[in-house]
Image (tube, grey):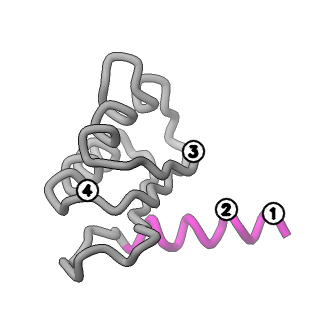
Amino acid sequence: MITMLPASGHVRECYSGTDGVLQSARKDNLFIDCSTIDRETVLEVVGKTTQMGVSFLDAPVSGGNNTPRAIPSLDVARVCCYFAACI
């Protein structure tokens, strides 16, 4: 699933809200967020997805604010596998 939302609050609600996507996520799911949001929200989502064993990749379209982002290397490797399977 790829998300691109306007603000941090939207990302939190989309992923962690009452009807958020993580409520029904499975370990084989891949979530890529292209929102340009604050680092704290990224770390919050990374923490939740990591606990669940779900792959998450932070990929802001604007490049963000040059703050180091949380991109677990395991998730980068899994993303490559997902896309390689599509070819």
If you read the primary sequence from the N terminus, does the residue marked by circle 3 or circle 2 appear first? 3
The residue beneath circle 3 is 28
Report the mark closest to the observer, 4 or 1: 4
Q: Residue at x 28, y 53 (%)?
A: 46
The residue beneath circle 4 is 42
73 relative to 85 in the view: left or right = left
Magenta-highlighted stretch: main secondary structure? helix
Q: Please tell me in which quadrant of the rendered image residue 22 appears.
A: top left
Query: Marks 3 and 1: CB-CB under 8 Å?
Result: no
Q: Amino acid at mark 2?
A: Tyr
Query: Marks 1 and 2: CB-CB under 8 Å?
Result: yes
Q: Which residues are magenta?
A: 73-87
Q: Please tell me in which quadrant of the rendered image residue 56 appears.
A: bottom left
**Residue furthest toward the top?**
18
Q: Residue at x 23, y 76 (%)?
A: 65
Residue 86 circle label: 1
